[in-house]
Image: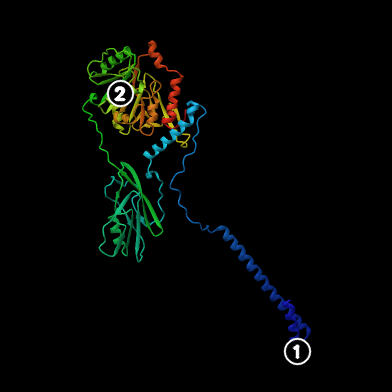
Amino acid sequence: MQTLQWCTYLKMAVGNRGTLQTAFIGCVLVACVLLSYTYYEYHHHTIHNVLKEVFKQRSPMPPQTKRLLPPRHLPPPGPCTCAKSAIILKNSLFDAESEEVEQRRHKEFQQHKARTESVLSTRLYAPSNSPLQYPIQGFKVRPMTSTFIPGLALHAQQRSTYTVFLEVSKGVLKTVIPAGGAQVHGNGESRLMMESSSLETLNELLADVTYTSTVYHIHTGDLASFQFEDHEGVFPITIKQPQPPVLYDMGTDINSQVTITTKTFLRYPELNRLLKSIRQFYKDIEVIIADDSFVTEKITGGDHTKHFIMPPAQGWFAGRNLAVSQVTTKYFLWVDDDFQFTKWTNIEEMVRVMEANPELDVLGGKVKQSQFDFSLRYEEGDEMEGGCLNRTFKSRFHSLPGYPQCSVVSGVINFFLARTDAAKRVRFDPKLKRVAHSEFFIDGLGSLMVATCGHVSIGHQGNKKQKTNYSRFRHPGKADLNSKLRHLFFKNNMKCLN
């Protein structure tokens, strides 16, 4: 359209001065110029848009989203999974009592959590690019004792004024009263504000901040919040009453280091053979015997033997508790009353292993050629159903450092050396009278470090003809087993046992 207009104007302009041929040539020239310009504009915009789209695909702009901190508290665990071969402990309950027992167990479990959990189990996250400096681990205070908080500082760029806040929930915070050029609010309270135009002065105030818990508790914790502008850091404060250590004088020989303990019931011939074998190798070591036989008999243990008489048929673990309660040495060696010492029963070697690994609490050996041991794997599950416990025999975690013939496990056979104070803390449940052994290690899971060694062993007297009364107690019926399962269901908040 624009080309025709230009041609008309040109024709009018040259109509009186030239020929029609001259006008036509001019129109053609104008049309070529306009077409070239139109072609350039089209391709320029097309290429620009294509390049723009390419760079957009290659370098996408990240979405502008608000940074969210992860949750501080873990979600409660869901139901655990029982193996197909596992015993469902709830099935051992009587139908009439099932619901009531579950409610009592749940209430007791809440009490257990209140006693054992604290804010110290809260998950904390270090903020990125934060100008705040504070202790992240190891800050421990005695209850109701003023203690300086180490390492508090602010590292910020130049500002006209600096303001920080500290806040706790189970104590109070204090700092020095500034001479001038600074303000402090909340001194001696749970929320402390400090402000200064000088960063150096502010950091001097932070270096003098103390924390004092306001409630006496032997082991709990607090969380301190440290804030500056949009930055916040949270750090734990462990509140713990220090414990005096319980130390044992090891003396100069094995007799002052180890006590041999056993429990007997209606097996005096076997017991006397055991004592005779002990005296063959350790004539002066102390032996403690717990005896709940119906009729007691004289034993031939000689000197350094203590024979404690119990009421009849009190049970396996009750006798263990009595024997261990009388131990005054650092270690005790547990043996059954039908075992027999041999030249391979090297107590000194077991002590050497334990002393070289002070984190160990129990060290087992072999009975003849049997090195009975197992690992325990526990999944907490939800609060109402309870946890799942899987017991795997001959499953070891790894070898004991420095002792390739020894392995870390969860439980061992009835021939073991134990730290006296550690075993006393776990104790042997006296409710388990007939069917019990691994239950001690179940109660000690997470508390006892256990290992087993294959180069120390003890003999076994073999199967002897037992008295009728002994066999009746040694091999209890189904009622005793169900009673134990009901006990584990409640006491260990357990859903199933494999």
In the image, residue 71 lies at what x, y percent? 45, 48
Which residue is found at the position 29% from the left and 23% from the top? 347
Q: Residue at x 76, y 80 (%)?
A: 24
Q: 110 or 409: which is nearer to us?
A: 110
Residue 385, image x and y in percent?
Answer: 48, 34
Q: Earlier in the sequence, mark 1 or mark 2?
A: 1
Direction from residue 300 to residue 226 in the image, left or right: right
Q: Amino acid at mark 1?
A: Arg
Q: Which residue is mark 2?
A: 322
| Structural crowding at the residue carrying mark 1, measured as other residues with C-alpha within 10 Å and reported as few (<14), some (14–19) or many (≥20) | few
The answer to which image quadrant residue 408 occupies is top left
Residue under the image location 65 percent in, 67 percent down: 43
The residue lying at 39 percent from left, 27 percent from top is 439
Going by the numbered disc 2, the residue's amino acid type is: Leu
At mark 2, the secondary structure is: helix
Residue pointed to by mark 1: 17
Q: Is residue 318 left or right of residue 41?
A: left
Give the vertical position of 5 relative to 415 (above or below): below
* Residue at the extreme left of the image, as rendered: 252
Q: Is residue 374 left or right of residue 283?
A: right
Q: Which residue occupies the extreme right position in the image?
A: 20
At label 2, counting other C-alpha atoms closer than 10 Å, the crowd grade (few under 14, some 14-19, many 20 or more) is many
Tell me if residue 136 comes above or below residue 342 in the rendering: below
